Image (spheres, helix red, strand yellow):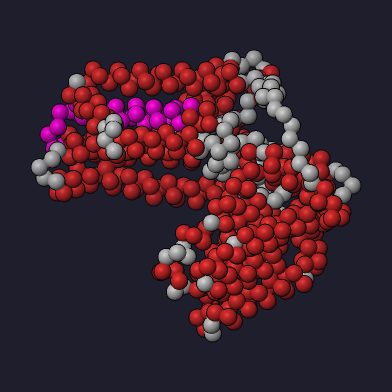
Amino acid sequence: MVKHFLSLEWKSFFRSASFGKGIAIKIFMGLLSLYFIVMFFGTGLLLYYGLKKASPETDPLTIVNGFLFYWVIADLVFRFFFQKLPVMVVKPLLIIPIKRSKIVNYVLGKSAISFFNFLPLFTIIPFGITLMVNGYPILSVLSWMFALILITLIINFLNFIIESLSSEIELSFLPIIGLSGGLFALNYFNIISFSRLFSNGIDAIYKSPIFIVIPLFILMLLYVINFKLLRNKLYLDSGLKEKVKEIETSNLDWTKNFGAIAPFMQLDLKLIWRNKRTKSSVWMVLIGLLYGLFFYPQPTYQGMPWFFTFIGVFSTGIFLINFGQFIPAWDSGYYKLLMSQNIKYEQYLQSKFTLMALSVAILFVLGIPYVFFGWKILLAHFVAAIYNIGVNTHVILYGGSFNRKKIDLSQKAAFNYQGTGAVQWLIGIPLLIIPMGIFALFYFLIGFELACSVLAILGILGIVFHQKLMKGITAKYIQSKYTMIEAFNQNN
């Protein structure tokens, strides 16, 4: 049965409409993985001798055991944000005679061979071998190594339980931040010394290998809990039963002032407010608005006016960037239905443009208090806003015509990279790097005021030629229309 599951996933990968882009991203991720493997392996080889040299009077193994608690906390947080439970399309399997337990065991077993579980081995194994070469008892060292492998798997399955419990919370990252931060604080202020307790437990396993049954039991318990959680959700109608909520309606009559594009704007605003994934765009607005406070109060950045533009583009364009980069993938769930209606594609795109342009104007107004740090900052934000409206809105709409990945709006928003492709990685260059480069070039060659004028002129030109630019962008979307429909039909 496992062979059949692997065969299905292999075919799904190669037959996907985003196969070409998926290959490019996987090559990049492969190189990144190779880099981490080399770093972890080098750490495993040199750790013993480095600790021996830094602290000759202390056993290197004791030092390592003392830091294992911090490794567990860091690994758990990192996994929560970046490791996802391996998934497969199970609905077609539920109508054929395959036991649900086999499907669940396959998914959980697949998670056990995750890269996140293999990476620590490149440090654990070389360090363990070094210990044995330097005269440490072989059985004790093997028990220590096996205990760390079990702890790695415990973190793996604990992460899935935390994700499952957090999935119903609006800001789903708060539980993991609260848990890890709370444990770290209790340890840091010596209220409960988890690092010492953890170190003593590993030392006990090292001295008496029989205690290895404790982490083994914890691992089995977490596996059973995960098995039950997944098995209970493995029904065709599991997504039909929802918690009953009182419906809250919003008055969107003001959008009627925008004429023919008003229905599309209302659709986008409802989509943003009613789904977990799109709500992240609203929360990111607050982060972008306060982004300048990380830099402007520091005297170092007061002497770097060329950097003001980057902050201005990011601060006034945070919604444009976060929401716009997934156009039209936000509508991928009903894109086929939308395209079958008698609507003008240009009006559909014009509504997106208007929403992003309004967000830039509002964020600039809300950011006017930055003038407290200097008039140059306010001027830089002003020209950045003009550039965002005139240039970046068109750039991001054009980039959207290359989107080929479906987005599940019901998934949690925090650090969710589902639907992210090569377009999202590359779009940051014209959005952020190019305006900063243009501004810096004219700033160093001539001066601050002229550099601002150049960016403002580029933005004004974009606004003046908006209709022509939109016609070209619309033609590109129409050309890609059926390719996107086919791609959005797939669960990649």
Residue visible at 50% across and 73% down in the picture: 305
Q: Main secondary structure of the magenta part?
A: helix
* Percent of width and height locating residue 294: 46, 59
* Percent of width and height locating residue 101: 55, 16
Residue visible at 53% across and 56% down in the picture: 290
- Furthest toward the right, the residue is 342
Residue 395, quarter of picture: bottom right
> Which of the two residues, 96 or 436, is positioned nearer the viewer here?
436
* Percent of width and height locating residue 303: 44, 74
For the N terminus, give its image quadrant.
top right
> Which of the two residues, 74 or 234, is positioned nearer the viewer here?
74
Residue 14 visible in rendering: no
> Which of the two residues, 333 or 187, is positioned nearer the viewer here?
187
- Furthest toward the bottom, the residue is 446
> Which of the two residues, 104 or 200, is positioned nearer the viewer here?
200
Residue 221, quarter of picture: top left
* Percent of width and height locating residue 335: 77, 43
Tell me if residue 40 comes above or below residue 304 in the rendering. above
Tell me if residue 298 comes above or below residue 142 in the rendering. below
Residue visible at 17% across and 24% down in the picture: 207
Residue range of the region highlighted in magenta in the rendering = 133-161
Residue visible at 67% across and 69% down in the picture: 386
Tell me, yes or no, whether the highlighted magenta stretch contains residue 147.
yes
Tell me, yes or no, whether the highlighted magenta stretch contains residue 396.
no
